[in-house]
């Protein structure tokens, strides 16, 4: 899970090439999960439309949305209440930290009630319960699921089952309906070959593994004696690893 998350944070190259048993995959993501948990906690219906559209009318709306999203989620997770939007971000959208905070509170008044109260850990725990439920629901159907933070990767044919598991898990634990988005549609150069019985020829697929784009990327990204990519984990082979009993 950590290696998948590192890929998600550091690149958009690796994830689309992940295959499961040689088959192309899709990734579904819970959208605006922690903001939705905030509204659910207070029993208030969330506003319609884009949570992060704060009425900004400047020249770089996509960049501003990213800054607002980061600040909104930081305010939810900031236990001290002292979060400051980075100066460079303030300059990019020509708004002060106080103006950004006020814009968020104007659209989402509930934020004012939880600033500095450490709701982030509570929501992360709920997040983990939802993720566990999603994986167990799929496991009961013999469906392999790879979690990446609050998104999930499955074989593309199982997208409907994944979507239903995510909706059901959210409804059972939080109540209401989640916002879901298809964040990745996988790509692969693998061409699955099947035996006459219909069983997938894994031996053939493994023979292609070394030349696949994902594995070439994986080796170039991780399998280094030192870590050339800040934020990515150094492989175990390059660490002094103690035996774990």
Image (cartoon, rainbow, N blue to C red):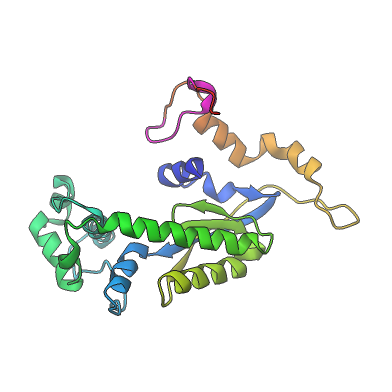
> In x, y percent, where is residue 69?
27, 59
Residue at x 21%, y 57% (from the top left corner): 75
Can residue 125 be seen in this snapshot? yes
- Magenta span: 229-240
Q: In the figure, residue 177 lies in which quadrant?
A: bottom left
Q: In the figure, residue 31 lies in which quadrant?
A: bottom left
> In x, y percent, where is residue 58?
17, 63
Examine the rendered structure and indicate whether residue 161 appears above or below residue 67. Answer: below
Asked whether, in this view, residue 216 is left or right of residue 202, the answer is left
Q: Nearer the viewer, residue 164 or 56?
A: 164
**Does the magenta run of residues contain 243?**
no
Residue at x 51%, y 58% (from the top left corner): 132
Q: Quadrant of the C terminus?
A: top right
**Does the magenta run of residues contain 232?**
yes
Q: Work out which residue is located at the far right of the displayed protein and give it.
A: 196
Total numbered labels placed on residues in the image: 0
> In x, y percent, where is residue 86?
17, 47
> In x, y percent, where is residue 173?
44, 69
Q: In the figure, residue 57 lies in which quadrant?
A: bottom left
Examine the rendered structure and indicate whether residue 130 appears above or below residue 41. Answer: above
Examine the rendered structure and indicate whether residue 100 appears above or below residue 234. Answer: below
Residue at x 34%, y 60% (from the top left corner): 123
Can residue 57 be seen in this snapshot? no
Prevailing secondary structure of the magenta residues: loop
Asked whether, in this view, residue 10 is left or right of residue 94, the answer is right
Q: Work out which residue is located at the far front of the displayed protein and give it.
A: 245
Asked whether, in this view, residue 72 is left or right of residue 219, the answer is left
Examine the rendered structure and indicate whether residue 149 appears above or below residue 176. Answer: above
Asked whether, in this view, residue 15 is left or right of residue 20, the answer is left
């Amino acid at each position: 899970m950590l290696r998948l998350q590192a890929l998600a944070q550091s690149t958009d190259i690796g994830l689309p090439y992940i295959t499961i048993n040689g088959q192309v995959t899709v990734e579904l993501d819970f959208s605006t999960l922690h903001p939705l948990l905030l509204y659910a906690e207070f029993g208030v219906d969330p506003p319609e439309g884009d949570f992060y559209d704060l009425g900004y009318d400047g020249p770089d709306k996509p960049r501003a949305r990213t800054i607002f999203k980061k600040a909104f989620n930081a305010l939810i997770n900031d236990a001290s209440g002292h979060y400051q939007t980075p100066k460079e971000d303030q300059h990019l959208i020509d708004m002060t930290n106080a103006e950004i905070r006020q814009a968020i509170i104007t659209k989402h008044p509930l934020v004012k009630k939880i600033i500095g109260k450490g709701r982030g850990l509570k929501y992360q725990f709920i997040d983990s319960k939802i993720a566990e439920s999603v994986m167990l629901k799929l496991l009961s159907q013999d469906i392999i699921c790879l979690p990446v933070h609050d998104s999930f990767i499955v074989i593309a044919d199982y997208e409907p089952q994944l979507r239903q598991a995510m909706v059901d898990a959210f409804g059972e634990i939080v109540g209401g309906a989640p916002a879901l988005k298809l964040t990745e549609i996988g790509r692969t150069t693998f061409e699955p070959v099947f035996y006459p019985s219909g069983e997938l020829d894994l031996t053939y697929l493994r023979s292609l593994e070394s030349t696949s784009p994902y594995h070439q990327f994986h080796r170039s990204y991780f399998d280094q004696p030192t870590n050339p990519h800040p934020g990515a984990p150094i492989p175990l082979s390059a660490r002094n690893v103690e035996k774990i009993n």
